[in-house]
Image (cartoon, helix red, strand yellow):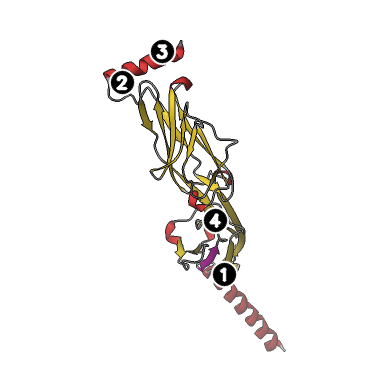
């Protein structure tokens, strides 16, 4: 009863209006990142009832990738899938499972749903999938001294481990991201799959006696201070602590006068002793 109502509502919509987007809801669920060699499942979420679904088609960068056609034997038509293989054990009419994904599987994916009666097609928005090779090592921090005076320029460099795509580096100073003017990317050769970022800033007594320097090397880049490692596809970090020397207290004018008075008294007393002798 319910499916019949949906069907005739859809027919009436097509007859009266050229746009029935509100009746047929459709979205492609595509993971933003996938690790090299793992399995990903692309989901085509729609509101078409099963007996009205005629075809589901997946495209990558606009090219046909995979089709499910109800009533066809076999029901699936798969085209060449660069950088992946179909996992038939997890693939369903509205879900496409890709296993052993490689970098060539990266791209923009979208799905199209076609109803049987009346014939109507709708395509979802495209979503990016990026296959990444994660970093195998933590980033390294290079700094030439670990004790600074107020007014010194702190200069440090962080270099990530290799990955693809190249990770993005962000510095944290005492847990907070400094202004962009304090951070400068270091250009590396095209063949190098690592990245590097230089940090320079004037040392202030407001930083405290100990300054915590943290280098984040992540994919994607820095999200915000509330994000943790679960929010990143690849997350590596290294931290060090440097010290800020306490400022020496200058001798005040009052102390200087007091010191001179003591010296004068001492000299006068010594002279008196000599005179009596």
Disc 4 residue crowd, few under 14, some 14–19, many 20+, Cα 10 Å = many
Question: Which element type, helix, strand or loop, lies under badge 4?
Answer: strand
Q: Position of residue 251 (x, y in %)?
A: 55, 70
- Secondary structure mainly formed by the magenta segment: strand
Closer to the chain start, of discs 4 and 1, is 4
In the foreground, 51 or 41:
51
- Which residue lies under the disc numbered 1? 255
Q: Which residue is mark 2?
A: 14
Q: Residue at x 43, y 26 (%)?
A: 54
Disc nearer the start of the sequence (2/1): 2
Query: Few, some or many C-alpha atoms within 10 Å of disc 1 (few <14, some 14-19, many ≥20)?
Result: few
Total count of labels: 4
Q: Are marks 2 and 1 in contact (CB under 8 Å)?
A: no
**Badge 2, how many Cα within 10 Å: few under 14, some, many 20+?**
some
Vertical order, 277 against 126 (above or below): below
Q: Is residue 45 left or right of residue 229?
A: left
Query: Which residue is located at x 55 percent, y 73 percent?
Result: 256
- Compute the Cα span from label 3 to label 1: 96 Å
Q: Residue furthest right?
A: 277
Q: Residues under labels 4 and 3: Cα distance?
A: 54 Å
Magenta stretch holds residue 10: no
Residue under label 4: 217
Residue 42 x/y as whole percent: 50, 37
Residue identified by numbered label 3: 5
Residue range (magenta)? 152-159
Is residue 7 among the parts visible in the rendering? yes
Q: For the residues carrying marks 3 and 1, which lies nearer the camera in this image?
A: 3
Asked whether the beta carbons under mark 2 and mark 4 sit within 8 Å of each other, the answer is: no
């Amino acid at each position: 009863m319910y499916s019949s109502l949906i069907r005739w509502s859809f027919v009436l919509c097509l007859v009266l209006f050229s746009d029935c987007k509100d009746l047929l809801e459709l979205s492609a669920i595509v993971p933003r990142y996938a690790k090299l060699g793992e399995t990903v499942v692309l989901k085509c979420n729609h509101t078409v009832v099963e007996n009205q679904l005629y075809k589901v088609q997946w495209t990558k960068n606009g090219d046909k990738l995979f089709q499910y056609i109800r009533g066809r034997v076999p029901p699936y038509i798969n085209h060449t899938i660069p950088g992946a293989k179909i996992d038939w054990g997890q693939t369903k009419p509205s879900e496409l499972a890709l296993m052993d994904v490689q970098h060539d599987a990266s791209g923009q994916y979208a799905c199209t749903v076609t109803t049987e009666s009346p014939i109507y097609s709708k395509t979802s928005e495209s979503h990016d999938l990026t296959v990444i090779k994660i970093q195998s090592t933590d980033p390294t921090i290079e700094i030439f001294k670990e004790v600074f005076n107020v007014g010194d320029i702190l200069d440090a460099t962080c270099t990530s481990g290799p990955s693809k795509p190249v990770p993005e580096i962000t510095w944290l100073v005492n847990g907070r991201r400094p202004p962009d003017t304090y951070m400068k990317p270091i250009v590396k050769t095209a063949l190098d799959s690592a990245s590097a970022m230089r940090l320079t800033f004037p040392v202030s007594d407001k930083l405290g006696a100990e300054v915590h320097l943290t280098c984040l090397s992540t994919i994607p880049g820095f999200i915000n201070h509330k994000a943790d490692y679960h929010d990143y596809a690849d997350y590596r970090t290294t931290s060090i602590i440097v010290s800020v020397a306490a400022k020496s207290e200058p001798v005040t004018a009052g102390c200087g006068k007091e010191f001179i008075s003591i010296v004068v008294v001492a000299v006068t007393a010594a002279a008196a002793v000599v005179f009596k002798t």
